[in-house]
Image (cartoon, coloured by chain):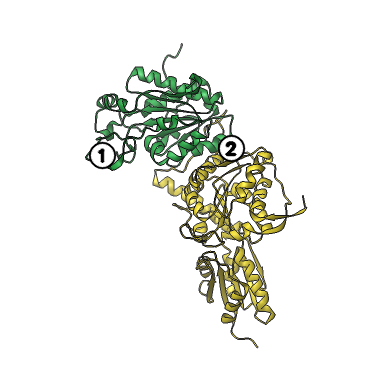
Chain colours: A green, B yellow
Amino acid sequence: MKEVAGKPAALTDKPFHYCPGCTHGIIHRLTAEVIDELGIREETIGIAPVGCSVLAYEYFDCDMHEASHGRAPAVATGVKRVHPDKVVFTYQGDGDLASIGTAEIVHAANRGENITTIFVNNAIYGMTGGQMAPTTLIDQKTKTSPAGRSRELTGSPLKISEMLSVLDGVTYLERVSVHDTKHIIKAKKAIKKAFEIQLAGKGFAMVEVLSTCPTNWGMTPIEAMKWLEENMIPIYKPGVLKDIEDGE
Amino acid sequence: MGEKVLMKGNEAIAEAAVKAGCRYFFGYPITPQNEIPAYLSWRLPEVGGVFLQAESEVAASNMVYGAAGAGARVLTSSSSPGISLKAEGISYIAGAELPAVIVNMMRGGPGLGGIQPAQSDYFQATKGMAHGDFHLLVLAPSSVQEAVDLTIDAFALADKYRNPVMLLADGMIGQMMEPVEFTREIDPETLPDKPWATNGAKGREKNIINSLALDPAELEKHNLKLKAKYDQMKEEEVRFASKGLDDAETVIVAYGTAARIAASAIELARQVGYKVGLIRPITLFPFPEEIINQTADKVANFLTIEMSTGQMIEDVRLAVNGKKPVHFYGRTGGMIPSPEEIFEQIKIIGGAKE
């Protein structure tokens, strides 16, 4: 009998600890499906971040290395330089990548490290209980911006993908979302392409995935999907920000 | 091999790392250790290795964390302020039980301090490197040849204990030239496999490199496992050199550059009848407690000499355990004591002769 649905081999049987409605589960699954489809599970080393996905090493069924906060691209650099023939990916949230880890992501990207980065942006610190992130929207209420984020006090949402897209070392960078089926299908294509670029030895590839945090946004999962679509998409516009193969 | 060559300390350490089979270096420029990365920037590619200048010490130590997890013999080097930044990665390396070698060519501090030789990172290296219940194995050379030998040993010790090892020297050792001989050369291809390394889970269960343990009972168990390693180091790895203990009335305890100068001071003192001996710790962790404690039964005084305001003296006092007075003389901030200054201290402690 042909199996039409099931868990990807690149995911373990361990139940996710993520909150109900959190989109990390979708993004884990997409990444694992891509690893399966490319047949690279036994060649892949994943780097887990600090943040909600700190336990990603328990979920991906490939070799995993848990990094310190923000340093996943540096750890990935160390692994990849030792094993240039293996596939190395980092899975990082917005506090990890766009705040404490800005130096590491900028320089890994600029060196054109032949790695793949999955950047999950939900505009808030989830694991520590809903603090403001550099990606938090103006007027968005968080534990550390209770009256809403003020531009005067804390600046504007950091568009790190736009920043990275100007670097020569970046081969491919796309922003996607997972708030509906159409976008999920697109997200998977982008993640697959980001791994294929590494397999072809073409350099640094990153996919920013817009994600929800119903718990810390104080919404139901459905409200959160809607909030993402109405509030995050206008600021963080999905699309290809850089694709060297398209001559950009 | 076997030929003596004149080399600067930093370059000799770099070559020793290559001889030890190290093929990966991640670092960031800082004085007075810059000759190590400069040397390895051409030497490692020559032997098929990788030299990478990181964007910061923080990144460098995390690259080391990645490369060590991936199974490589890997080195980083820095000097005092840079080591503070590397502390993050070093704590993770220790927590995840990975082998790596870190060189600290100490300079005066605190803060930006200066760039002249100092020994003021003893506490940091032996006790307070970073957060958490862990120790580095710390080796302290007092000559360029010893720096070479200890660098090669450092990689083997790191592998033996799956623990970071620090070569703790000062700008003097790094900058001076002495004849050295490389008597060992290790081909990295001949090193034993590291079955725990992240190199792709081909035909095996996945490997995880990690220092996270949310369950306190699990973390306690892990920390006790680490402690058992440190206890084993205390049993098996203590190293020191000694001189003149047979008839000594006063024993100087000093390491690295301070020990060299103390040895000159002892010669001056012995010429005029002061019976002075030397205990030179080569491992600072594990500390040579036993020899110091045993010596305390036979001598009248100890004098600790350091290029700091007094750090190792705390371990000397613990080892002496109140049996005899422990005196101290130190210079700090990049100032180096002269043999005559130390001789003066010997005279004060030993009383008038003739």
Q: Callout 2: few (<14), some (14-19), or many (20+) C-alpha neighbours within 10 Å?
A: few
- Looking at the picture, tell me which residue is in the foreground, B206 or B249: B249
Position in image of residue A197 (x %, y %): 52, 24
Q: Chain of mark 1?
A: A
- Looking at the picture, tell me which residue is in the foreground, B36 or B129: B36
* In this rendering, position of residue A200 left or right of residue A128: right
Taking the view exactly as shown, the residue that stands out farthest to the top is A1
Residue on which disc 2 sits: B195
- Looking at the picture, tell me which residue is in the foreground, B324 or B347: B347
Q: Callout 1: few (<14), some (14-19), or many (20+) C-alpha neighbours within 10 Å?
A: some
Residue on which disc 1 sits: A150
Look at the image and tell me whether residue B51 can be seen.
yes
Position in image of residue B72 (x %, y %): 60, 40
Discs 2 and 1 lie in a common subunit? no
Indicate the amino acid at tag 1: Ser
Residue in the image at 57% along x and 36% along y? A81
Indicate the amino acid at tag 2: Pro
Q: Is residue B151 above or below residue A169?
A: below
Q: Is residue B217 above or below residue A20?
A: below
Mark 2–mark 1 distance (CA, rounded to whole Å): 51 Å
Position in image of residue B31 (x %, y %): 56, 54
Look at the image and tell me whether residue B208 can be seen.
no
Residue in the image at 56% along x and 23% along y? A200
Q: Chain of mark 2?
A: B
Q: Are marks 2 and 1 in contact (CB under 8 Å)?
A: no
Q: Nearer the viewer, mark 2 or mark 1?
A: 1
